[in-house]
Image (spheres, helix red, strand yellow):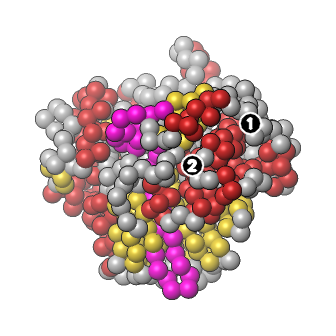
């Protein structure tokens, strides 16, 4: 069964952009039509989303990207996530009475990595300047834009969060969130974007903007300093991958959770998923159990590999997946999914862009929760993310809070290649939905031959702890059978605005290497669009 999107797959040859808001998608397409490449268009789209979908993304958050370089037939990964302030400490939090990381507020703020990430992407793999990439966003912030349906709904849901401090008014209009179809301007954010356009990332991480962010966080009781901002830098990483039935699936390495998707794919590859049927209880059961095993390992081992040893080689191996697969009973859900024993080896926006030369940029940008930490740095329009909330306060855990360390990160772009040619640029937004969204999209397309739009339209599940949520249109017999097998089943009913109640927000563009045809789909549970020329 499918979510009734009534959307056709979009086809083009000279370039395509798919993302969660049509104005942003068009901003990226304008860059492609003017001669820019996939990276140029992805950054311009991300910057525009900062304006038209500010609860999800922005310069106060983080960015990750995977890039397919068509000429070299190579994939590179950028980690544009920020580190926690150097003064951050478990002892300090415990002395303040915390038993776990605060979900919001000043202590949840880590260094925003987005701006430097954008700049590095453009300088290394782009053809235009950061100033040019920011221009569409600046125009919308200064001149205004009409608010779209689901984004307007999400904005209204966060009025109280924004109104808690005076600076939140910078993202409200007359003390409230804008409604669908209303015009919205963000003049303070426009000023910040213009400053960055003129001075580059240096103008963000040093000087008045950095001072405004650091001073505000400290006034509210947090750790962030100007020094923390001044020493920030992005990193190029070796991407990680696995083969799934002849398709090579690529993810960014930890501290991102893409490795969970690769483990789950390795596990389910040992089952005849195609023979089960796309919306059968059997397929749901096996994918759910693989997802649970992947998350068990993720919550045990995933951390910043530059600070602790993360067993990436073992984790992504087929041999390790064989052992994990053996734990799955085809007729009975695990009571509790255990993590494996590994020996160390040697709300968010997603953007997919493929240009006419076959280069791809799979990019994800986020402030984590809607409007992040809830802190808007006064006079800047910058929403500061709450990414540090994902640290552990167990000092023995690999993801333990430590100054200068990157946290467990949920945002994960993805690519897939076949026979050393680009096949798919894709991603699914939505916190811990993301790796399980990747798993479901890939099995939809590889095992069942769905196109980009159909793969996104297909009904999804989401594992949440020891429970599983299904979309309301799922066949009653499927839900009943999963319950009989021991799954703690919940069914989502209602319109599911803003991502079907948490089923994520995907975008996908495939490329036919024989004729260069691009085929794009956009999440039916969001406001977005796939556009091409």
Q: Which residues are magenta?
A: 491-518
Membership of 485 in magenta stretch = no
Q: Earlier in the sequence, mark 1 or mark 2?
A: 2
Q: Position of residue 276 (x, y in %)?
A: 67, 52
| Lateral position of residue 104 relative to residue 416, left or right | left
Residue 446, percent across and down? 62, 63
Q: Is residue 84 above or below residue 21?
A: above
CA separation in Å, label 1 and label 2: 16 Å
The mark total stands at 2
* Residue found at the very far bottom of the displayed protein: 515
> For numbered disc 2, what is the local secondary structure?
loop
Position of the C terminus, as image quadrant, is bottom left
Which is more toward the observer, 88 or 278?
278
Mark 1 closeness class: few <14, some 14–19, many ≥20 residues within 10 Å: some
Q: Which residue is mark 1?
A: 331
Read off the residue under disc 2: 279
What residue is at 36 percent from the left and 74 percent from the top?
Answer: 532
């Amino acid at each position: 069964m499918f979510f009734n999107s009534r959307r056709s797959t979009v086809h083009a040859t000279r370039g395509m952009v798919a993302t969660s808001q049509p104005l942003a998608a068009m901003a990226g397409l304008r860059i492609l039509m003017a001669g820019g490449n996939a990276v140029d268009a992805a950054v311009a789209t991300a910057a525009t989303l900062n304006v038209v979908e500010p609860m999800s993304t922005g310069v106060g958050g983080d960015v990750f990207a995977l890039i397919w370089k068509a000429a070299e037939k190579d994939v590179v990964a950028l980690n544009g996530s920020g580190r926690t302030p150097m003064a951050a400490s478990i002892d300090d939090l415990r002395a303040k009475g915390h038993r776990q990381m605060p979900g919001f507020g000043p202590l949840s703020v880590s260094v925003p990595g987005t701006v430097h990430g954008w700049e590095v992407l453009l300088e290394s793999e782009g053809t235009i300047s950061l100033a040019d990439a920011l221009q569409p966003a600046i125009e919308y912030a200064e001149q205004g834009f009409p608010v779209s349906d689901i984004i307007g709904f999400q904005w209204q849901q966060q009025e109280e969060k924004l109104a808690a401090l005076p600076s939140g008014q910078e993202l409200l209009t007359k003390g409230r969130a804008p409604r669908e179809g209303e015009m919205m301007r963000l003049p303070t954010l426009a000023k910040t974007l213009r400053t960055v356009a003129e001075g580059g990332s240096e103008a963000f991480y040093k000087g008045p903007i950095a001072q405004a962010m650091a001073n505000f966080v400290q006034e509210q009781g947090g750790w962030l300093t100007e020094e923390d901002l001044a020493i920030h830098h992005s990193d190029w990483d070796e991407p990680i991958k696995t083969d799934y039935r002849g398709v090579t699936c690529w993810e960014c390495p930890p501290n991102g959770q893409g490795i969970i998707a690769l483990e789950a794919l390795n596990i389910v590859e040992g089952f005849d998923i195609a023979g089960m049927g796309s919306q059968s209880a059997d397929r749901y059961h096996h994918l759910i159990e693989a997802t649970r095993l992947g998350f068990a390992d993720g919550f045990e081992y995933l951390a910043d590999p530059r600070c602790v040893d993360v067993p990436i080689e073992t984790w992504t191996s087929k041999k390790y997946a064989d052992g994990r697969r053996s734990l799955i009973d085809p007729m009975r859900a695990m009571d509790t999914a255990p993590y494996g024993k590994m020996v160390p080896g040697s709300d968010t926006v997603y953007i997919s862009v493929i240009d006419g030369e076959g280069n791809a940029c799979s990019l994800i940008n986020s402030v984590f929760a809607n409007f992040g930490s809830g802190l808007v740095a006064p006079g800047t329009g910058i929403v500061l993310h709450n990414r540090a909330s994902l640290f552990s306060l167990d000092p023995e855990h690999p993801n333990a809070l430590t100054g200068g360390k990157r946290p467990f990160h949920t945002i994960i772009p993805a690519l897939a290649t076949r026979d050393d040619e680009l096949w798919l640029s894709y991603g699914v937004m939505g916190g811990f939905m993301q790796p399980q969204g990747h798993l479901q999209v890939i099995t939809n397309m590889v095992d069942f031959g769905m196109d980009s739009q159909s793969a996104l339209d297909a009904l999804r599940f989401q594992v949440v702890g020891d429970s599983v949520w299904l979309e309301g249109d799922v066949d009653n017999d499927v839900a009943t059978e999963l319950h009989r097998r021991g799954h703690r089943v919940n069914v989502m009913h209602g319109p599911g605005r803003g991502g079907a109640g948490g089923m994520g927000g995907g975008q996908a563009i495939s490329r036919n290497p024989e004729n260069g045809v691009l085929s794009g789909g956009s999440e039916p549970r969001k406001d977005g669009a796939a556009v091409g020329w």
